[in-house]
Amino acid sequence: MNDVDLASLLGEHAQRQSVPGAAIGILRDGAVATAYHGIADVRSAESVTAETRFAAGSLTKSMVATVIARLADAGGLSLDDHVATHVPELRTAAWAARATVRDLMANRSGLPLRADLEFGFDRRPDVDDGALSRLVAEVGVAAAPPRSVFWSYSNVGWCLLGRAIEHVTGGTWEDAMQELLFEPARMPSTTFANAPDSIPRAVGHGVTDGGVTPIDRPGPRAYGPAGTTLLTTVTDLLTFARLQFDDASLAALRAPHSDVSIAGWLDAWGLGWARFDWGGEPVWGWDGLIGGERSILRMLPRRRAAVALMTNASTL
């Protein structure tokens, strides 16, 4: 499929779903095809282009997992270290003395699960460097569940991993992501919500019977490692996918750690990646949904192929 055919297909589906703007990219046999449709913001009518950044949402978690794996490969930490070893705010939390970094990545750590911690975005709007540490400190004093360990997808778990990155590197988790992933992998368009206003970026939209409405909702920095602040493009997402194929140390992230088949969502979970059983061969990837924007990445490692889709409406 060439770029023209891809653009036609993207436009057809975007119009059917009332999506204002979208970008798609396909990696196959080392070649990349991309297409762009519509507008980034209905108020400005600025077109979606190759430079338009969309919110990565929870695909940030897969990038955090990649940086953790690279720190482990360099000897900065071990995936089998206890969480309390690398998260100072959790030194007195009994569950963090038992659970490991690997457990956090596998979503089976037994951390305190509370709605006000998992989704307290509006209550924690601070944008300073200490925002993440303060959230983690709240987790440190929260009551943990019984010792039984079960799989549960968690925003807070990935915030704790972001804090572990800060402890190991001595800087902000954002700086570590830049230095350990975005720069060496050559992902120049991947940045954060506090980037200069001059960069082209999409705005999320809500789709109702009354039409399409922009959603102005800045992402809180405390939840950045879970996916509230990272911006990227489909081209950079495909570069990120190619890295997963090229760096042998990252293959371990795609080893299933939990067989949690949930219809319409995932069939197994590794370490920052989900497996989807589409028949024939395993497909790996993850999604993001935040503030009226969606991101999707699917990878076929055996074929070294990937598809990335980003839109500025929650309807896809």
Image: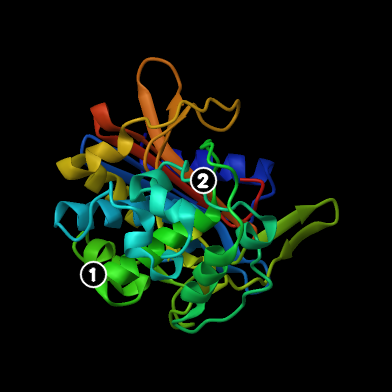
Say if 202 sits above or below 98 in the image: below
- The x, y position of residue 76, in whole percent, is 19, 61
Q: Is residue 77 above or below residue 298?
A: below
Q: Amino acid at mark 1?
A: Glu
Q: Residue furthest top?
A: 280
Q: Mark 2 falls on what kind of element?
A: loop
Residue at the spot x=43%, y=49% of the render?
Answer: 35
Q: Amino acid at mark 2?
A: Gly
Q: From the top left corner, tell me how far across and down residue 52 is, in percent.
A: 45, 65
Which residue, given by chain and number where applicable, does mark 2 sit on?
110
Q: Is residue 202 visible?
A: no
For the C terminus, give its image quadrant.
Answer: top right
Which image quadrant for residue 91? bottom left
Is residue 245 at least partly visible in the picture? yes
In the picture shown, does residue 206 fall above or below 188?
above
Which residue is denoted by mark 1 in the rendering?
A: 179
Residue 70 falls left or right of residue 98: left
**Residue nearest the observer in this picture, 48 or 88:** 88
Mark 2–mark 1 Cα distance, whole angstroms, equals 31 Å
Residue 19 vs residue 272: left or right? Answer: right
**How far across and down, in percent of the image, does residue 280 sit?**
37, 15
At a point 70% along the width and 66% down the height, the residue shown is: 214
Q: Residue at x 44, y 76 (%)?
A: 199
Res 271 → quadrant: top left
Q: Residues within 10 Å of mark 1 (few under 14, many from 20)?
A: few
Q: Classify the position of the N terminus by image quarter.
A: top left
Q: Secondary structure at mark 1?
A: helix
Chain-order first, disc 2 or disc 1: 2
Q: Nearer the viewer, residue 1 or 240?
A: 240
